[in-house]
Image (spheres, rainbow, N blue to C red):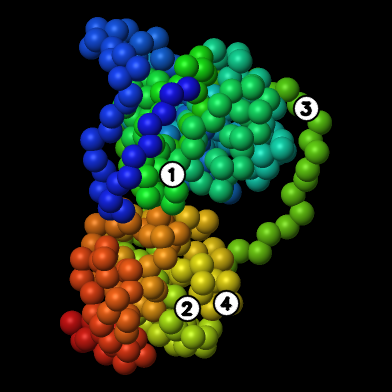
Amino acid sequence: MFSLARPTALRGMRTQFLPSSIAARSPLQSAALARLASTLAILEQREGALNTSSLGAVTAGKKIGGSVHGFIAGKNVKGVAEEAAKVDGLEKVIMVENEAYQRGLAENWAPLLVENIKKGGYTHVIVGHSAFGKNLLPRVAALLDVQQISDVMSVESEDTFVRPIYAGNAILTVQSSDSLKLLTVRQTSFPPAAVEGGSASIEEGTDPKAEQPTSWVSENLTKSDRPELATAAKVVSGGRGLKSKEEFDRLMPPLADALGAAIGASRAAVDSGFADNSLQVGQTGKNVAPQLYLCAGISGAIQHLAGMKDSKVIACINKDADAPIFQVADVGLVGDLFEKVPELTEKLKAQ
């Protein structure tokens, strides 16, 4: 595997370059390789519904070229497979019916996926860079003894990919010589494939029925009527500058309601107990790319910027005019958030 890292601005993509030791292929060679490619896109489902944000894996597969098959597993997944069969770009949907795979436990999924990868003879396996994908694919890579390429932002060719390193401070162009490429793709970089227009066939996959080392016990979910954070068009985030959970709850929900936005938080706010960790935006939280990202009391640590720098418009409120967040913000307001946020909320409600 060859790679080249270079510094980059925090926002936006730049032209990528490979070292001169990596010979450029002719268009004819690239086209031939693309025709030989075959991709297995891992699709996520929950409670019998297809997770459309996972369809970015299909979009990435189409950029590679060749055939793209979808893979889905769980309990009573026939309906989900029929839904996935309509996704534009899929030639086939492979489904495995088994309750052991319903909750997406990576320990159970890994041998299942390995069996079906070998059977299908795929050249690429792609899954979203979600909690599910980040948990599953390293196990699959270990079982197959191949190199995983994580958090892919761009597909240059069937064997060359672009990904961030150092929390987005540098961009790495990677060329893999492995016969099988395992990729997790950044969901904000690959829009979901259209859920209409496809006519894929449905085929039953191979279930190795391997020993299941883990079982599902329970979960506690935070329920909200607001948009889902990872896919919302508007996001408002609060940071440590809010000083307490009481102030976070007093200021951020009304602002989010006035905008029709999802609520996010910095890691500092989550670690301080101001917000649930499901709301964390950043390198160790969720990546978001809304039309509007409005943050208050967030200084702009590099780890936070890595999760929201792809937002179309970034606006911030902070009393420190030298805070790093102002270097990436499109609109900035220097002032006391305990005065400015309520004032902004009232003006938004009045419109």
Among the 4 quarters of the image, the one containing residue 332: bottom left
- Give the camera-side residue of 106 and 313: 313
Mark 2 and mark 1 lie on one chain; the one further toward the N terminus is: 1
Residue on which disc 4 sits: 272
**Is 210 positioned to the left or the right of 121 in the image?**
right
Q: Is residue 74 left or right of residue 32?
A: right
Residue marked by disc 1: 165
253 and 78: which is toward the camera: 253
Mark 4: give few (<14), some (14-19) or many (20+) Cα within 10 Å. Answer: some
Q: Which residue occupies 77% across, 54% down?
A: 217
Point 61% across, 42% down: residue? 135
The reply to whether dot 2 and dot 3 touch (C-beta < 8 Å) is no
Q: Nearer the viewer, mark 2 or mark 3?
A: 2
> Does residue 48 appear in the picture of this structure?
no
Q: CA distance from mark 3 to mark 4?
A: 42 Å
Which corner quadrant holds the C terminus? bottom left
Alpha carbon distance from label 4 to label 2:
8 Å
Q: Secondary structure at mark 4?
A: loop
Residue under circle 3?
Answer: 210
Looking at marks 1 and 3 on the same chain, the residue that comes earlier in the sequence is marked by 1
**Which residue is under mark 2?**
240
Amino acid bearing label 4: Ser
Residue type, mark 3 in image: Ala
Q: Nearer the viewer, mark 2 or mark 1?
A: 1
Q: Position of residue 292 (x, y in %)?
A: 27, 64
Sequence-wise, the earlier of marks 2 and 3 is: 3
